[in-house]
Image (cartoon, rainbow, N blue to C red):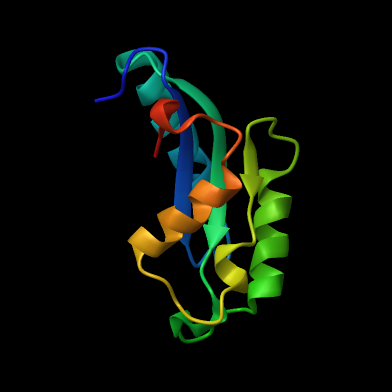
């Protein structure tokens, strides 16, 4: 449960090989839930492609998947693609991903920031 009026960033991790309309729709549904049911304020949604070392057969390069994720986010004023995770040398567990994202999201106060 979110604190009322808490600022929230939604983080979607995955291969995004390729990103689809459903990835964007997932963020929209999550935003609607947080804002309408929990009273939070979603400040951004982030698409974060995994590193090349994820090991999925047929995985396009991280550079290409990041470019596709950026194109998918397009003109959305609250969704963006981030290359931090896919630039890592090895595949990261979810906790490491969140710790890395905290550095990126320093704009928000820690007490008001929920993923």
Q: Residue drawn at (30%, 23%), measured in percent from left and top?
A: 2
Quarter occupied by the N terminus: top left
* Percent x, y of residue 40: 40, 18
Q: Is residue 17 visible?
A: no
* 97 to 9, vertically: above or below: below
* Residue located farthest toward the left when viewing the structure as drawn: 1
State the residue at coordinates (55%, 31%): 108
Q: Where does the C terminus fall, quadrant-wise?
A: top left
Left or right for 73, reference 85: right
Give me the residue at 54% from left, 57% from top: 48
- Looking at the rendered structure, the number of numbered marks drawn on it comes to 0
The x and y percentages for residue 54 are 45, 80
Residue 16 visible in the snapshot? yes
Compared across the picture, whether 91 is left or right of 18 comes to left
Q: Which residue is drawn at 54% across and 75% down?
A: 51
Quarter of the rendering containing residue 24 = top right
- Front residue (pair 110, 80): 110
On screen, residue 113 above or below 21: above
The image shows residue 8 at horizontal and vertical percentages of: 45, 29
Q: At which x and y percent is residue 100?
A: 50, 58
**Relative to 84, is 47 above or below?**
above
Q: Nearer the viewer, residue 115 or 105?
A: 105
Q: Is residue 38 above or below residue 100?
A: above
């Amino acid at each position: 449960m979110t604190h009322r009026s808490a600022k929230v960033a939604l983080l979607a991790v995955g291969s995004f090989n390729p990103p689809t309309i459903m990835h964007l729709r997932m963020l929209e549904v999550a935003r609607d839930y947080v804002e309408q049911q929990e009273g939070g304020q979603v400040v951004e949604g982030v698409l974060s492609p995994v590193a090349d070392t994820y090991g999925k057969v047929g995985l396009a390069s991280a550079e290409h998947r990041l470019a596709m994720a950026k194109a998918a986010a397009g003109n959305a004023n609250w969704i963006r693609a981030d290359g931090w995770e896919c630039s890592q040398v090895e595949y990261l567990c979810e906790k490491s991903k969140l710790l890395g994202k905290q550095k990126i999201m320093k704009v928000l106060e820690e007490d008001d920031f929920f993923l």
